[in-house]
Amino acid sequence: MALIVDGKLTIPLYHGTSDLFYESIRQFGLGGRNLIAEFQVIDLLRDLFTICRTSLPNEEQWLVKMQVAEWIAQQCVSRGGLNFRHGSTYLTPSSYTAANYATSSEYGSEALEQFMLLWNRLQENGIELQQQISDGARPIINFALRPKTPILIKVDGIPAPVLAAENGRNTASVFQWLESIMNDPIAFPVLCQQANFELREPIRIGAAEVLRIVEHSQDRVKEPVLAPYVSTTTTE
């Protein structure tokens, strides 16, 4: 079987997130609205990071956490190739990888997770924030504290031209490599985790399947246990 037929992928791609973002995705499509940018999460994360670094002692347990927060604040790709650029929507042929992302943070967003981590640290230490920062943070806090569950969005037949290779690699070479392993049922689930894509155009989820993650283990590569997702809200 070929990877691309009539300009479309013959394998599904997955996006892992929290249903905090479901209504936005339902209304505007996957990649159609950037709530992280609208809430100014990155800008405020930079403010919180600076305050944490200057006002609180950086104990050993916080060194790694603060490093991740700094990478996200800088919107960079680390020397090891880890992508901390936010604002785009990413897809993967691995349901395991997508489930890992969706379950590694209760918020379904790495940027939002780090924002809440620093916000809670400052609150626990009684650090008084400038009114401008507190006012800007309030909509983020209200959004993040809603009830939430991890979900996967499975997209079939995605057009190849709407995809870009993650970290700037050539898309054609990634497609070629995926096609070379896609018919191997043993190698594909493991190796396809290395082939993630950035979405360049919004995709309406009428052509997608939204699934709730019932069970997932990050200890070994295994398909997550999924069930149809039923939204309990009608508005954001």
Image (cartoon, grey):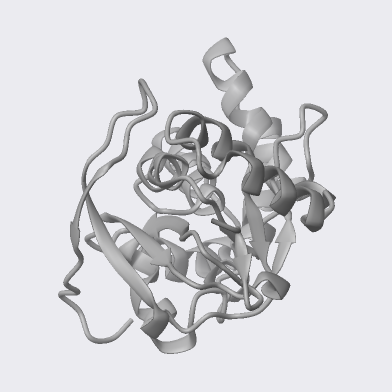
Where is residue 187 drawn, in percent x and y? 51, 29
Q: Nearer the viewer, residue 97 or 8?
A: 8
Q: Which quarter shows the N terminus?
A: bottom right
Which residue is painted at 66% across and 76% down in the image?
Answer: 7
| Residue 127 in view here | no
User: Relative to residue 139, is residue 210 drawn left or right?
Assistant: left
Q: Nearer the viewer, residue 213 or 208?
A: 208
Q: Is residue 30 above or below residue 65?
A: below
Where is residue 5 drawn, in percent x and y? 61, 71
Where is residue 205 drawn, in percent x and y? 41, 80
Q: Nearer the viewer, residue 117 or 102?
A: 102
Which residue is painted at 28% across and 41% down in the image?
Answer: 224
Which residue is painted at 52% across and 64% down in the image?
Answer: 10
User: Relative to residue 42, is residue 204 drawn left or right?
Assistant: left
Q: Is residue 75 above or below residue 6?
A: above
Which residue is painted at 33% across and 81% down in the image?
Answer: 236
Residue positioned most to the top: 60
| Residue 181 in view here | yes
Q: Is residue 145 above or below residue 156?
A: above
Where is residue 176 drawn, in percent x and y? 73, 49
Question: Image quarter for residue 216?
Answer: top left
